[in-house]
Image: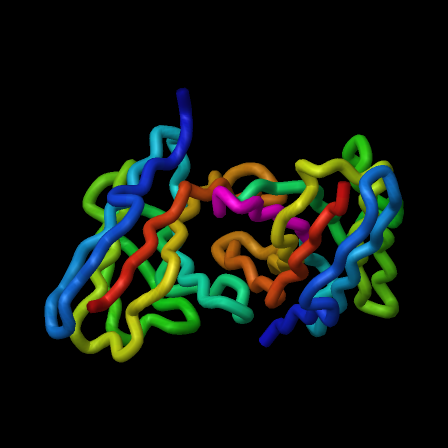
């Protein structure tokens, strides 16, 4: 079974600073996908960024980027120039890359607060 | 607008009663999922369905039941056998034909047992 670990239950950072959220996972699969989801106070889950394990290049979406270390099974999220709207719970998630097995395994989340 | 709707937003139930949570999507997605969210535990998979008239148990299916009679709908029934049903419930859907199969989430239903 796959497990996803987020070791930082809470973090806070000043507006405009950079923050990195950590995520590690355990799997015997070679092909898989990794995701970061954001859950703001509205509780709507929003996909932030995704990474395909077979791609060595780290994914980037505007101010959000990941540091994917496949050998270390690490998938951290970096938020640059943080904004008040980034305040949310952030969940790391894992999915096997197998047709018929598109289930997500989530970590326990990191509550991020951006301080004005 | 395409998306996923869940109703109601808040639901109250007396102990011993069954209750059904609604989930509808108009994204033409084949797969649908139900997750439960508790404080400090992230999201856990209850049931999922990849095609109409077929569904599989997730990690915490005990005390829950589902049906998938239409592609657009995947209702979840919380039965009286569920020992601790108070939680936030999220429905999601995804296509099966493009990878990665990003899951899109509904706004959720907060269930409280009185």
Establish if A28 lies above or below A37.
Answer: below
Q: Is residue B50 magenta?
A: no
**In this picture, which residue range is highlighted in magenta?**
A34-43
Residue A91 figure quarter: bottom right
Instruction: Classify residue A86 by image quadrant.
Output: top right
The residue that appears at 87% across and 46% down in the rendered structure is A18
Q: Position of residue B48 (x, y in %)?
A: 37, 57
Residue A4: image quadrant is bottom right
Residue found at the very far left of the displayed protein = B17
Above-or-below relation of A53 to A106: above
Instruction: Look at 86% across and 69% down and name the residue there.
Output: A72
Q: Residue furthest front?
A: A116
Is A38 covered by the magenta stretch? yes
**Of residues A69 and B95, the one drawn nearer to the viewer in this rendering:** A69
Left or right: residue B109 compared with residue A11: left
Q: Main secondary structure of the magenta part?
A: strand
Q: Is residue A54 left or right of residue A105?
A: right
Q: Position of residue B78 (x, y in %)?
A: 22, 64
Which residue is drawn at the image coordinates 25% and 67% (left, top)?
A: B64
Q: Is residue B76 visible?
A: yes
State the image coordinates of residue A23 (x, y, percent, origin top left). 75, 64
According to the image, what is the colour scheme of the structure? Answer: rainbow
The answer to whether residue B31 is above or below residue B112 is above
Q: Position of residue B9 (x, y in %)?
A: 30, 45
The foreground one among B71 and B112 is: B112
In the rendered view of the protein, which quadrant contains the C terminus of chain B? Answer: bottom left
Q: Is residue B78 above or below residue B76?
A: below
Total numbered circles: 0
Whether residue A59 is visible: no
Question: B99 or B17, which is in the foreground?
Answer: B17
């Amino acid at each position: 079974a796959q497990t996803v670990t987020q070791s930082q239950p809470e973090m806070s950072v000043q507006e405009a600073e950079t923050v990195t959220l950590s995520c590690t996972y355990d799997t015997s699969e070679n092909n898989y996908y990794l995701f970061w989801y954001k859950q703001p106070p509205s509780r709507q889950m929003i996909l932030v960024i995704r990474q395909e394990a077979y791609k060595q290049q780290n994914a980037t979406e505007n101010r959000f980027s990941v540091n994917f270390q496949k050998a270390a099974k690490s998938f951290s999220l970096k938020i640059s120039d943080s904004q008040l709207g980034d305040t949310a719970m952030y969940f790391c998630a894992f999915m096997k890359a197998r047709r018929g097995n598109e289930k997500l395994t989530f970590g326990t989340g990191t509550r991020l607060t951006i301080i004005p | 607008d395409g998306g996923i709707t869940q109703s109601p937003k808040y639901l109250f139930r007396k102990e011993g009663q069954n209750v059904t949570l609604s989930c509808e999507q108009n994204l033409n997605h084949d797969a649908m999922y139900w997750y439960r969210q508790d404080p400090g535990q992230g999201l856990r998979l209850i049931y999922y369905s990849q095609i109409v008239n077929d569904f599989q148990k997730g990690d915490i299916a005990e005390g829950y039941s589902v049906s998938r009679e239409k592609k657009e709908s995947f209702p979840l029934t919380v039965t009286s056998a569920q020992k601790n049903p108070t939680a936030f419930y999220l429905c999601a859907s995804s296509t099966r034909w493009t990878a990665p199969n990003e899951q899109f989430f509904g706004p959720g239903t907060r269930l409280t047992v009185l």
